[in-house]
Image (tube, coloured by chain):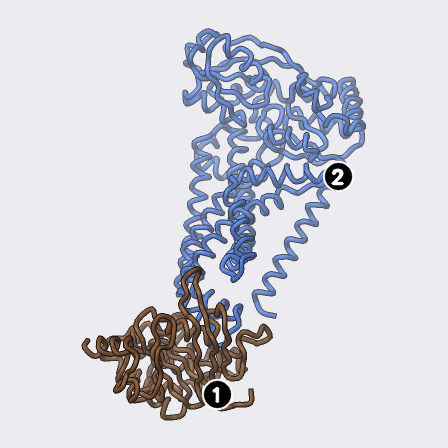
Chain colours: A blue, B brown
């Protein structure tokens, strides 16, 4: 066997074992999704573990009711989408029980009641809703705050800007793009206690109830267990203990972080482990996707220059579809859309979905420049090779490809760098790569500038190394 | 085929690109060891005709039999047919990513199952034959046009073809390079190679060709010995053509 054949087999075997592992991970009885950044209900602490009222309640209830589960932290939107697509069994994410949601989901008995408050910067003069006229208000999609904000928008005449996670919303107010945000009271007060430079200026409005949700008509047993367990932990005092733990404590006592570690290097060494894991995930995704996309791209490129009509037609159709679709849409389509279509509880692990997404998208781009590279080789080369009696594929391999690939090398390097950066988009399907790691760390410590600077530097270092490596390879080939 | 002295038999050959008919019904026979030169104005279809002989262009109509293989027969193995035909192009078409030696040994190693050392030994002989023994290990781009064309001839000869086709082999060369290439071709002709040469080199045609074929408007207008064609042209278009060429 030749070296490249061995490499392909090893690669396939590795992929196979991943799929296997991912399937095994689903052996837990239930998969329950939660939000990533909704302290004190759920947030990531040092070392990548999730904590919070929702997390602890779920744990206590599961213990009482003897069921096992796997926790899946996604953005709130993704969590809700996955529940309606039957990708997860339940969602616990500080989710308000609304009549609209009741149409698609079944809710547990309320486990917490809260109201919406308005928060503004500490030095802001805004004190009531009337002062919002003509200004912009930040809202987080899918929350009670968003519903409330929307309901009074017409009356008070403000503009709305939506965000996917709480921290970006707070930051938008902090830097002055929006004058105020609406947020659930416990979440807002917890954040302020832990360093968000905002203040609450309204009373609680539209008090609503939080509930645990399952898809309508599904998982009735799980819902029943949740209700029974909730009653049990309320009766034995565990419930109150959990609330006290988060609502009356400073975050540092939970996460173990100290104020002295808030310098750039302090934050860096403190989060080294988490950042390392995120970076590793990014690298893993990048390398596997580059290999798969290159294989797919070469196939599409060769099909594109094949004699006859079928090959070029297949090639340009696939390139057209996967190059034309935004990466994020493709990721959602594969991760949420396809399982939804297939049904029968079919699931694709996020990592595999992410890998397929990158392979198809980057592979389409690669295919386009591979095809172009082959076409750029003078037609006389193929004619000369065929005239010597070389069959088409041999002529392709020995004469056209070596010349075409030389033309393509700069495009390949470019594509590798784009692939590395594109992995960050996969955070939308819950893959905790480097960018998502940054989001999670900031959700905990609100150090937006320092952490994003850190993440940016790490990307630049990796891209520099990748460029050096590529240039070295390029010199070797030429 | 019973008549083994016939190398090429072309019958009623037509070739069209869309509505444009480039070849309008050609008939030609080439005998073993014969050297045929094809002359005529640009666009008369000479190159297209030559390319039809190796199926680089597929005829619209008509029959081509070359080295006893019928190209229009679907069962004919074109790769095998091409192994026995040496083709030399106007723009050489050497493989720029390979050395001169590798250019020559590629096909024998891939197709004749020669070992690399056998192929190299015979490639070096061929290079000596075309006067480029010292250029074996350089890349084609460092050679002059004339040298590249001689390498291209050596590359074609490495497959021991039964017939050589030359498509304007000196048209892309600087005038001072033409002589070397024609010299190699003349030697080949003297060694008994069957050759069809599309050319504008009237001197070469006069001196080397057994037969000269004049083409215009997709048809053979006149053919005969060099003496006949150049001294006693009958066709008015040929007379006109020769007058223009000689006056240049």
Rounded to the nearest whole Å, what is the CA distance between mark 2 and mark 1?
72 Å
Percent of width and height locating residue B34: 40, 89
Percent of width and height locating residue A367: 50, 53
Query: Mark 1 falls within which chain?
Result: B
At 32% from the left and 88% from the top, the residue drawn is B208
Which residue occupies the foreground of this view, A299 or A15?
A: A299
Question: Are dots 2 and 1 in contact, CB under 8 Å?
Answer: no
B153 lies above or below A116: below
The answer to whether any part of residue B160 appears in the image is: no
Across the whole image, how many numbered discs are drawn on residues? 2
**A141 lies left or right of A475:** right
Q: Which quarter shows the N terminus of chain B?
A: bottom right
At 73% from the left and 23% from the top, the residue drawn is A106
Judged from the image, the secondary structure of the residue bearing numbered disc 1 is: strand
Q: Quadrant of residue A239?
A: top right
Percent of width and height locating residue A299: 54, 58
B230 lies above or below A108: below
Mark 2 Cα within 10 Å, few/some/many (few <14, many 20+)?
few
- Residue highlighted by disc 2: A344
Q: Which quarter shows the C terminus of chain B?
A: bottom left
Question: Do the residues at discs 2 and 1 belong to one chain?
Answer: no
Which residue occupies the foreground of this view, B242 or B88?
A: B242
A380 lies above or below A329: below
Residue B6's disc number: 1
Query: Mark 2 falls within which chain?
Result: A
Judged from the image, the secondary structure of the residue bearing numbered disc 2 is: loop
Q: Quadrant of residue A24?
A: top right
Mark 1 Cα within 10 Å, few/some/many (few <14, many 20+)?
some
The answer to whether any part of residue A16 appears in the image is: yes
Which residue occupies the foreground of this view, A193 or B191?
A: B191
At 39% from the left and 76% from the top, the residue drawn is B99
Percent of width and height locating residue A333: 60, 38
């Amino acid at each position: 066997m030749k070296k490249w054949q061995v490499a392909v087999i090893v690669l396939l075997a590795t992929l196979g074992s991943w799929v296997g592992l991912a399937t095994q991970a689903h052996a837990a009885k239930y998969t329950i999704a939660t939000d990533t950044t909704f302290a004190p209900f759920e947030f990531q602490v040092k070392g990548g573990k999730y904590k919070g009222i929702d997390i602890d309640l779920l744990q206590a209830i599961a213990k009482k009711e003897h069921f096992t589960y796997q926790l899946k932290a996604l953005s709130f939107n993704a969590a809700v989408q996955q529940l309606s697509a039957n990708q997860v069994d339940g969602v616990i994410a500080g989710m308000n029980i609304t009549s609209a949601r009741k149409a698609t989901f079944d809710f547990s008995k309320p486990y917490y009641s809260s109201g919406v408050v308005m928060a503004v910067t500490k030095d802001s003069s805004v004190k009531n809703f009337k002062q919002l006229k003509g200004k912009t208000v930040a809202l987080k999609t899918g929350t009670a705050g968003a519903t409330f904000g929307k309901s009074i928008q017409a009356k008070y005449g403000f503009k709305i800007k939506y965000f996917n996670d709480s921290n970006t919303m707070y930051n938008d107010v902090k830097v002055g793009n929006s004058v105020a945000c609406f947020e659930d009271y416990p979440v807002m007060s917890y954040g302020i206690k832990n360093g968000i430079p905002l203040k609450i200026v309204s009373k609680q409005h539209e008090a609503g109830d939080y509930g645990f949700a399952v898809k309508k008509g599904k998982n009735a047993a799980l819902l029943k267990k949740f209700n029974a367990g909730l009653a049990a932990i309320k009766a034995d005092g565990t419930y109150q203990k959990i609330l006290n733990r988060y609502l009356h404590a400073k975050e540092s006592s939970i996460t173990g972080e100290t104020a002295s570690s808030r310098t750039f290097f302090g934050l860096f060494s403190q989060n080294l482990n988490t950042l390392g894991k995120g970076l590793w995930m990014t690298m893993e995704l990048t390398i596997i996707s580059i290999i798969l996309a290159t294989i797919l791209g070469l196939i599409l490129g060769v099909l594109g220059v094949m004699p006859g009509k079928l090959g070029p037609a297949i090639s340009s159709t696939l390139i057209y579809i996967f190059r034309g679709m935004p990466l994020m849409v493709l990721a959602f389509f594969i991760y949420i859309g396809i399982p939804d279509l297939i049904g029968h509880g079919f699931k694709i692990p996020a990592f595999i979905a992410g890998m397929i997404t990158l392979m198809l998208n980057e592979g389409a781009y690669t295919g386009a420049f591979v095809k172009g590279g082959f076409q750029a080789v003078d037609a006389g080369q193929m004619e000369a090779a065929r005239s010597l009696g070389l069959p088409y594929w041999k002529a392709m391999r020995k004469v056209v490809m070596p010349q075409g690939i030389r033309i393509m090398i700069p495009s390949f390097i470019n594509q590798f760098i784009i692939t590395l950066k594109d992995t960050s988009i996969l955070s939308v399907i819950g893959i905790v790569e480097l960018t998502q790691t940054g989001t999670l760390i900031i959700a905990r410590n609100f150090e937006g500038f320092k952490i994003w600077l850190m993440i940016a530097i790490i990307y630049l270092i990796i891209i520099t190394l990748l460029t050096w490596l590529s240039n070295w390879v390029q010199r070797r080939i030429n | 085929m019973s008549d083994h002295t016939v190398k090429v038999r072309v019958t009623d050959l037509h070739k069209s690109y869309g509505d444009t008919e480039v070849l309008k019904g050609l008939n030609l026979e080439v005998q073993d060891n014969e050297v045929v030169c094809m002359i005529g104005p640009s666009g008369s279809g000479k190159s297209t005709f030559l390319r039809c002989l190796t199926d680089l262009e597929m005829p619209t109509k008509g029959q081509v039999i070359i080295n006893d293989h019928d190209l229009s027969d679907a069962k004919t193995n074109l790769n095998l047919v091409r192994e026995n035909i040496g083709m030399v192009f106007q723009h050489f078409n050497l493989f720029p990513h390979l050395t001169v030696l590798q250019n020559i040994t590629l096909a024998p190693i891939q197709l004749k199952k020669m070992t690399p050392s056998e192929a190299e030994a015979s490639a070096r002989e061929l290079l000596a034959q075309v006067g480029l023994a010292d250029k074996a290990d350089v890349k084609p781009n460092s050679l002059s046009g004339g040298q590249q064309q001689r390498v291209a001839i050596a590359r074609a000869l490495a497959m021991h073809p039964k017939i050589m086709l030359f498509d304007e082999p000196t048209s892309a060369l600087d005038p001072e390079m033409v002589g070397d290439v024609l010299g190699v071709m003349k030697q080949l002709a003297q060694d008994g190679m069957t050759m069809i040469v599309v050319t504008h080199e009237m001197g070469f045609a006069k001196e080397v060709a057994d037969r000269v074929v004049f083409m215009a408007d997709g048809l053979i207008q006149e053919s005969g010995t060099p003496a006949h064609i150049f001294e006693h042209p009958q066709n008015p278009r040929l007379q006109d053509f020769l007058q223009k060429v000689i006056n240049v």
